[in-house]
Image (cartoon, rainbow, N blue to C red):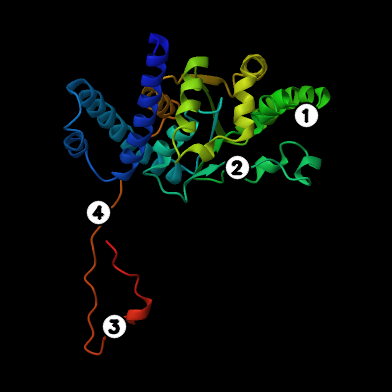
Amino acid sequence: MTKDREQLIRRIREELTDSYDEERELEHDDQNTDEIQALLATETDEYRENRRIYFRELFRMQAELVKLQDWIVKTGKKVVILFEGRDAAGKGGVIKRITQRLNPRVCRVAALPAPSDRERTQWYFQRFISHLPAAGEIVLFDRSWYNRAGVERVMGFCDDQQYEEFFRTVPEFEKMLTRSGITLIKYWFSISDEEQSIRFLGRIHDPLKQWKLSPMDLESRRRWEEYTKAKEIMLERTHIPEAPWWVVEADDKKKARLNCIHHLLSQIEYQEVDHPAVVLPPRERHDNYVRHPVPKEIIVPARY
């Protein structure tokens, strides 16, 4: 086996390990960094220390996200965050960490499917408008109207006239959003050619994640250079003062998450909101109260 092949196999194994480690991370929502560290006691010292730092910073910033959420609710602010990037760039991972501890009634994710036949006849931006936030809400777009500048352009789903009209319209559209009081933040997750290849191979060899690889994803891999050109044009033509682009270096997933969340928190001047002390009221008790047994035939069998 050549050295290059050995290195590739090692990286794929690392990608698979990291993938399952992420699932373990999400399982332990209520554990602190010390408990996480105990779970990883069998790992190497360097790995354990890196994980300890990662969880410490992640939990600290997730606590700040809760404060930000409370402030947005109290002040009635409206926030839209766009996440764009190549397939497997890590957009979904950072969205999960942002929303993990927030109220889904306040912070929601908009991940729109391909437009229907009817939606294709509408004004291009029309189907996105209904997902914009009301006062006191945060909306995270997992891909957005920038599909037209990326996948639609590269895959030939729009013609040259539609493409140019998008670039004429989107700056004015985003200026309208900001004038209406919406804070608009746009992130592009940037990964290298080699890193995307490794992540795709990891998904191919992971039966739990093969569903993430669509024929469109595989075709996008073949058209890497076309996507690069489309991305560069998009950033150049839609980077406006009212809604600038921010590029997240994403070859390292965990660093990308921390860097993105840290930057997001710096973009909004929020303050901690005082809450009244929560007191659990005593349960009322009545002499005639009877709790009837549940019929055995409708109880889920205790297999575990």
What residue would you read off at disc 3? 293
Disc 2 vs disc 1: which is toward the camera? 1
Crowd class of label 3 (few under 14; some 14 to 19; many from 20; radius 10 Å): few
What residue would you read off at disc 1? 158
Identified at 70% across, 23% down, the residue is: 154
What residue would you read off at disc 2? 132
Q: Cα distance, mark 2 to mark 1?
A: 24 Å
Identified at 71% across, 37% down, the residue is: 125
Vertical placement of residue 131 versus 181, above or below? below
What residue would you read off at disc 4? 277
- The earlier-in-sequence mark between 3 and 2 is 2
Disc 4 vs disc 3: which is toward the camera? 3
Identified at 24% across, 26% down, the residue is: 53
Disc 3, SS: loop
Where is residue 146? Give x, y as percent.
65, 28
Circle 1: residue type: Cys
Circle 4: residue type: Ala
Circle 3: residue type: Pro
| Quadrant of image for the C terminus | bottom left
Q: Label for residue 33?
A: none
Residue 193 in sight from this viewpoint = yes
Q: Dividing the picture into quarters, in which one does residue 296 lie?
A: bottom left
- The earlier-in-sequence mark between 3 and 1 is 1
Where is residue 116? Give x, y as percent.
73, 45
